[in-house]
Amino acid sequence: MNATAVSPVVPVDFWTSIFRGWRGRCPRCGTGSLFGSFLKMQSNCPSCGLALEPFRADDAPAYFTIFAVGHVVIPMVLAFEKYGDTPPLWLHALLWLPLSVILALLLLPRIKGAVIALLWTQSADVPKPTASGSAPLL
């Protein structure tokens, strides 16, 4: 038997795979890492060999991150403006810009992992290019 043979993996339910993706782990086995660096996806899971390249998250994680950060920061900005006796703009910039950047950097890889796991659970891989080099129209 080959030493690199992959053992069969038990089926995974929807929420378990999403949680594994949120943690940056393979949605199928939960042990291999999804990312080789901060946001660069690995082509295959190092543990179970799942091909991760067909599951492209594209811009969805960025949109969801902006949505989440906006819903956290904007109410705090409005409350600070209302109860803070009209603070100067430099104070707003000093508070909210770093908070927004830190939240975005913390959430973006987690949301990207969850989106990749969602794509995997729904078997939404990208069609392979044809011999002419373009993807077939669906």
Image (cartoon, rainbow, N blue to C red):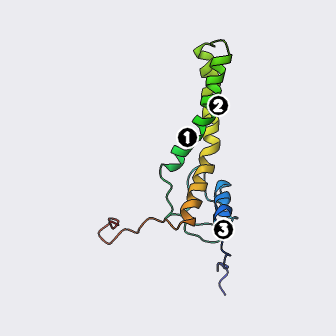
Q: Is residue 98 above or below residue 27?
A: above
Element on which disc 3 rests: loop
Drawn side of residue 56 relative to residue 10, left or right: left
N-term mark: 1 or 2: 1
Which residue lies at the image location 59% right of the left edge and 45% below the top edge? Answer: 108
Q: Is residue 72 above or below residue 94?
A: below
Distance in Å between CA atoms under marks 3 and 1: 27 Å
Element on which disc 2 rests: helix
Whether tag 3 and tag 1 are in contact, CB under 8 A, the answer is: no
N-term mark: 3 or 2: 3
Q: Quadrant of residue 1?
A: bottom right
Towards the viewer: 78 or 26: 78
Which residue lies at the image location 53% right of the left edge and 61% below the top edge? Answer: 119
Q: Is residue 80 above or below residue 137?
A: above
> Few, some or many C-alpha atoms within 10 Å of disc 1 (few <14, some 14-19, many ≥20)?
few
Q: Is residue 67 above or below residue 53?
A: above
Towards the viewer: 34 or 96: 96
Residue lying farthest to the bottom in this orientation = 1
Distance in Å between CA atoms under marks 3 and 2: 34 Å
Drawn side of residue 59 relative to residue 103, left or right: left
Q: Position of residue 30 (x, y in %)?
A: 69, 64
Location of mark 1 (residue)? 67
Location of mark 2 (residue)? 99
N-term mark: 3 or 1: 3
Task: Name which residue type carries label 3.
Answer: Asp
Can residue 127 be seen here? The reply is yes
Q: Position of residue 75 (x, y in %)?
A: 62, 29
Location of the C terminus by quadrant is: bottom left
Location of mark 3 (residue)? 13
Can residue 25 be seen here? The reply is no
Q: Position of residue 87 (x, y in %)?
A: 63, 13
Task: Name which residue type carries label 1.
Answer: Phe
